[in-house]
Image (spheres, rainbow, N blue to C red):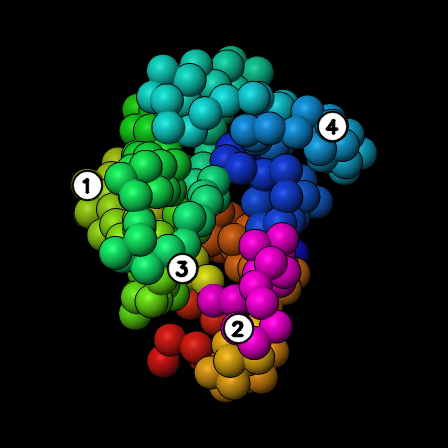
Amino acid sequence: MSDLAGKGIIVTGATRGIGRAIALEAARCGANVAFNYARSDAQAAELKEELSACGVKAMAFKADVGDLKAAREMVNAVKKEFGAIDGLVNNAGLTRDKLLVMMTEEDWSEVLRVNLTGAFNFARAAAFIMMKAKRGAILNVTSVSGLSGMAGQVNYSASKAGLIGMTKAMAKELGRMGVRVNALALGFIETDMTAALPEANRKAALEMIPLGRFGSVADVAPAAAFLLSDAAAYITGAVVQIDGGLAM
């Protein structure tokens, strides 16, 4: 288990799936965890209670990642409560899958606004604090869709490819200030999003995965905790694939 004792960690989009698993793993590793969410107050309250049960501080914010002002306000509130922001996980994301010729301007702009601009907003807000402290780790949750592209996901693939470029550029900018930036490129992970796939699509996807199974959030969360921890102190600019070999 990675040691995050006493560290202040922010996870965006954490009430479900991958974000929730990462938030809970960080808390189990001793981190104080703050998270934002978009809709369900009940899910947020449940997660906050589970995080607190780990013996750490927990904060929940109903905030739109696409709003830079909201991101700044959340980051500053977390800094005030936790005393430091040692890690940021840009996990919030959505899909609006359609073929290019059927995709609307709103389908395009909303996916980019949440998946890419949202990550920029939180990274920008947190970077000021991390640079001043001369330490910190930013982890961007991207996808193999951003590495190889997926039909029907022009908007999503573009946003996730953008996160990969952003990760590498930020790693080069912030490294001299002691701030590390990495990314997780995920394949098919069992969440609400993959559960909605038609059975024929699930079968076709499984046939493309060398390990022959979908991943679980338990395959992702420990890797995220490791990259946030001091055990990964010499890793920056990396894009770690957790995809069962899908994008080889």
Tag 4 or tag 2, which sits nearer the N-term? Answer: 4
Q: Amino acid at mark 4?
A: Ala
Name the disc covering residue 173, or none.
1
Q: Please provide percent x and percent y for residue 31.
A: 62, 37
Measured Cα–Cα span from mark 4 to mark 3: 28 Å
| Relative image position of residue 203 (x, y in whole percent) | 57, 79
- Which numbered disc covers residue 44? none
Q: How many marks?
A: 4
In the image, taking residue 184 as reference, residue 36 lies left or right, namely right
Counting residues from the start of the chain, the first of labels 4 and 3 encountered is 4
Residue that protrudes farthest toward the right in the picture: 53
Residue found 36% across the figure and 80% down from its top: 248
Element type at marker 4? helix
Q: Any magenta on residue 168?
A: no
Q: Earlier in the sequence, mark 1 or mark 4?
A: 4
Local SS, label 1: helix
Look at the image and give the residue range highlighted in magenta: 187-201
Q: Residue furthest front?
A: 102
> Magenta span has 194?
yes
Residue where numbered disc 4 is placed: 42
Q: Which residue is mark 2?
A: 201
Of callouts 1 and 2, the N-terminal one: 1
Q: How far apart are the alpha carbons under marks 2 and 4?
A: 32 Å
